[in-house]
Amino acid sequence: MKYSAAPTRSPLQRLVEATVEGCTNCGKCVRDCAFLKKYGTPKSIAAGFDPTDRQSLHRPFECSLCGLCSAVCPEKLDLDGLFLEMRREAVDRDLGAYPEHKPLVAYEKVGTSRRFSLYRLPHGCKTVFFPGCSLPGTRPEAVHSLLALMQQADPSVGVVFDCCMKPSHSLGRELHASSMFEEMNDWLLKHGVQEVLVACPNCQVMFERYGHGLKVRTAWEALAESGVRPEPAQGTVTVHDPCVIRNAEPVHRAVRTLLKRQGLVVEEMRHCGKTTVCCGKGGAVNLLNPPLAAAWGELRKKEADGRRIITYCAGCVQALEEHTPANHLVDLLFAPQQTLAGKKKGAKAPITYLNRLRLKLSFKRKKGKAVLRERTYLPGHAVLPKKRFWRLPFTQVLIVAAAAGAIWFSV
Ligand code: SF4
Ligand code: SF4
Ligand code: SF4
C-alpha cells in the first residue's frame, strides 16, 4: 500500500494495512458507533490515514477505544488496537497533547503522588488489594468492607493505593504508562507479592497487559468463590459489563453470581458480555467530544428501559448515572435497600480527593507490623522533588473546597 507518508510506528503500519485489506465495508461495526457513523468504515479511515496530517491524527482521539467494533467484526480485525496505535503516532509526533485532557492527566498524577499513594504490606503478605483511584474516592467505606472480607480469608492481605496508569495508556503516552507501571510491578515482586486483587476493570487490563509475575483476579471473583452471602434484596436489575473487559467471561459470571445470591433478578440488555458498549468515558472522549460520548449513555438508557443498571467500574457509574439510574455493585452488596430505593450515590469531586486522603491516612496509621511505602518515582527522576504542601494545586483546590463547604454549612 502507498502512503503520502508512512507511519513511524511499525505496529500501526501493519494494522493500517490489515484494515485496508481485510475490511469488506459490511457496516456491522458502524451500526452502534457514533464515531464510525461520523467518519466512515474502518477501511475508509485507514485508507485515508496520513500521519503528517493533523486531522488524521486527531480522529482517533474521538474513538472511545471500547472494542465493540473488533468484537462484532466478521473479519476479526483489531480496530480499537488500530485507533490506539494512531493515538501513539500522534504522541510520537508531538501532536497528541490536548488541553481538554489536562484534568485527566492531573488526576493520574495525583494518584501516583507521594501524598495520595500508599503501599501497606502486613507481615507475610502475598496478596494485595488494589482498589484503583475512583472507588476509594467515591466509595471509601466499600474499600474498608471489601478488604475486611478479604482479610477474613487471609489476614495478611495488604492494600495498595496507586494509579494503574490507564489514563496515560489510553491517551497514547505509552512510554510513561509502561515505565510507571513497571516500577510498581517490580516493587511488589521484590516485596514478595504474588497476587493482586483488583476492583476496577481498567486496573485489571493494565495488570494483564503490562504486568509480569503477578496473578491478577478481581475482587468479585474472590467474593463469589468465597461463598460470601450479602444482605438479601428483592428486585430486578440489569448489568453493564465494562467495555475494557468485554472478554473476561469469568468476571461477568462472578458479578451475576453475587447479584443472584442476593436474591435479585438479573435481566440482560442487548449489548452485554462480549458485545457490551462503552459507558461514554472510554478513551476520554467525554472530554474532547461530549456529544459523541453521550451517544453511548443514551444507547444504554434505551436498553436499560427503566431498570437500574449495576456495573463494577466506578467510572462507568459516573458516566451512566447522567443518563439513567445506575449504581456500583458494591452499593448493592453493602447497602441493598438504600440502593434499590435510589438513595445510594457515590461522592463527587472535590470530596473524592478528601476521601482518598482520609482512607490513605487510616491505613498509614493502622497498628501492626507492615512494610509501608509512598510513591516517589517519576520516569527520568530518582525520586519526586519535594514540594511545599500549600503550593500543590490539588491542595489549593481542597483548601478552597473546604472553605466553600464551611461557608455553605454556616449559612
Ligand atoms: S468507539 Fe468503540 S466501537 Fe467505535 S470505533 Fe472506537 S473502539 Fe470501535
Ligand atoms: S465489521 Fe469489520 S469488515 Fe465490517 S465494516 Fe467493520 S471493520 Fe469492516
Ligand atoms: S468507564 Fe467503564 S465502560 Fe467506560 S470506558 Fe471505562 S471501563 Fe469502559
Image (cartoon, rainbow, N blue to C red):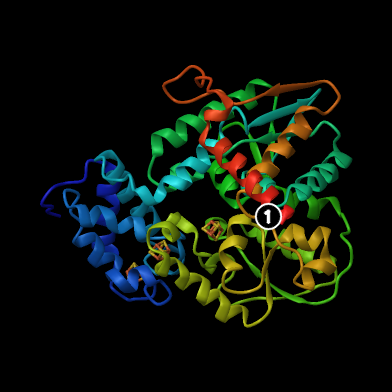
In the image, residue 118 lies at what x, y percent?
67, 30
Q: Residue at x 75, y 27 (%)?
A: 121
- Residue 104 visible to the viewer: yes
Residue to which mark 1 is pinned = 408
In the image, residue 212 lies at what x, y percent?
56, 33
Q: Quadrant of the C terminus?
A: bottom right
In the image, residue 148 lies at what x, y percent?
84, 43
**Of residues 264 and 100, the one drawn nearer to the viewer in this rendering:** 100
**Of residues 58 and 81, the one drawn nearer to the viewer in this rendering:** 58
In the drawing, does residue 366 fall left or right of residue 208?
A: right
- Residue 210 visible to the viewer: no
Cβ of mark 1 under 8 A from ligand 3: no
Please tell me in which quarter of the rendered image ligand 1 is found.
bottom left
Is residue 226 depicted above or below 321 in this figure? above
**Of residues 307 and 356, the one drawn nearer to the viewer in this rendering:** 356
Give the secondary structure at mark 1.
helix
Count of numbered marks: 1
